[in-house]
Amino acid sequence: MAKRRAEPLVWLLFSSGGLAAALLLPVLLALFGLVIPAGWVSAPTQAHLLSLVSNPLTRIVLLGLCILALFHWAHRFRYTLYEGLQLKHLSKLIIVGCYGGALVGSALAFYLLLIVL
Amino acid sequence: MSVRYTEFHPRWYRPPMSVFWWAGRRSYLIFVLRELSSIFTAWSVVFLLLLVHAVSEGSRQYRQFLNLSSNPWMLTLNVITLAFLVFHAVTWFNLAPQAMVVRLRGNRVPRSAIAGAHYAGWALLSALAAWLILR
Amino acid sequence: MADRIILQVSRYRPERELEPTTQEYEIPLNEEWAVLDGLNHVKDTLDGTLSYRWSCRMGICGSCGMTVNGEPRLTCATFLTDYRPGPIRIEPLHNFPVIRDLVVEIGDFMRKLPQVKPWLIHGEDTAAPQSELLQTPADLDEYKQYSMCINCMLCYSACPIVGLEEDFLGPAAIALAQRYNLDSRDEGADERLDVLSTAAGVWGCTFVGECTKACPKGVDPAGAIQRYKLTAATDSLRSFLMPWRSS
């Protein structure tokens, strides 16, 4: 049986991504996706958020979160397509689409968090 | 009815697995929903990057983002997203003890402690993030 | 009037039909009877042509696994009264080819199991032991849970990946590999790595967790597999970051 060299490492990304997403995404989506738009708290000022996001530590943490969460999605979605829709025969296309998509998203996150800011 | 059957080599019955195998059992359905939560994880990243971009561009773009996020469709999508994110977190933390055997001074740390540590970390980080953002 | 209960049993006779059919039998509902006792009553008094496997009738041989009301169960450990007033649907174990009636073909598992080398492996350089190998209770605790497997195949029946992926080694085989990997007397973890760290090995598993729920002996194969994923992944990471180090 062919030993897959990349698979264990990609699984580590999936695993850390799952943990990171579970720990940090709920509060962020709760605030910016529900609590603030619904008006339950007043929205923070742009100046405050800018200073928060410009902090190097925040940028590193957010970048890490984005990259890990995207690769978590890529790995999990790949297997969902294999098992849920029985698309294993399209595996090459799925691999390129999923991990490629995660790579593109990560590059975008890198650009927005480390270059623009 | 002609049935192919040779003595001592019976024809085995092998039904193919239905594409909707996951719909037949509650536990399978919950599993597939758990797996589909990854789509909402990816959307959360996109949404956050939109926020970061808006904040870095200036007050006007930030206000546009706030308007976008209060659009009823966007609000609905994000409520669903939040539900799936919480579902992902809860299933992840509840399954973590099964995947980790931690030994402290020879004894196995109980499952509830491992799960509890995850939930505690979740609560702490959420409180910290909320405080940083809303103060 | 004594209680009765109906068994709806899957029948498959390849010599005269293309697909399974269902046959109903009405049997006494005895408080002490397991589903297996019900099937034995059918075969002894109602229909001698019914075919099924059983042996120890006490949950240790692993022969009598079947699908009872949609769940993979040991029929010797499942009681008729649990399904009162019935009827009880009895089908062969899912994910296996059906040979006849309730008898399934398990050759696939029998071929996969030796691939993980489920025996104690001594290193080539290790001298032959001069006396018995000693193990502390703590050493035993490391792998004891995984040694409880009775090869009943309920976990294979519960696992959707077993049904989807023909090559997947499956829960019991991987749990048994872990039983030896974690045994302090064993030195074969490297040999098993090549078999386990593959798409047909642990990486095919997506932690559905149904195998652990189905296991009648508390083996927790899902846990064994996830633990091994971490082991194999950290091993891969180490050899990736520090290729000069021998594992």
Image: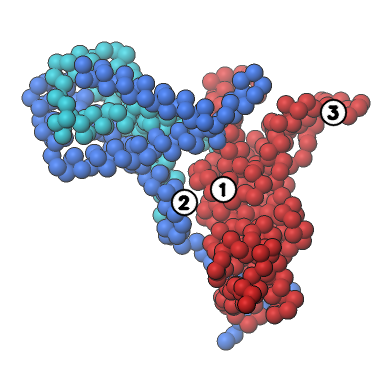
Chain colours: A cyan, B blue, C red
Q: Quadrant of the N terminus of chain C?
A: bottom right
Alpha carbon of mark 1 to alpha carbon of mark 2: how far? Answer: 10 Å
Residue A89: % across, % down: 45, 53
Mark 1 element type: helix
Which of C126/B27 is in front?
B27
The residue lying at 16 percent from left, 34 percent from top is A38
Whether marks 1 and 3 lie on the same chain: yes
Q: Farthest left residue?
A: B60
Amino acid at circle 2: Ser
The residue beneath circle 1 is C213
Q: Is residue C235 above or below residue B78?
A: above
Subunit that carries the residue with mark 3: C
Alpha carbon of mark 3 to alpha carbon of mark 2: how far? Answer: 43 Å
Q: Is residue A22 above or below residue C153?
A: above
Subunit that carries the residue with mark 2: B
The residue lying at 22 percent from left, 34 percent from top is A33
Nearer to us: label 1 or label 3: 1
Mark 3 element type: loop
Residue C71: % across, % down: 56, 58
Q: Which mark is residue C133?
A: 3
Amino acid at circle 1: Lys
Relative placement, left or right, of C238 versus C121 is: left
Mark 2 element type: helix
Subunit that carries the residue with mark 1: C
Residue A69 visible? The answer is yes
The residue lying at 11 percent from left, 21 percent from top is B58
Badge 2: residue crowd in 10 Å (few <14, some 14–19, many ≥20) = some
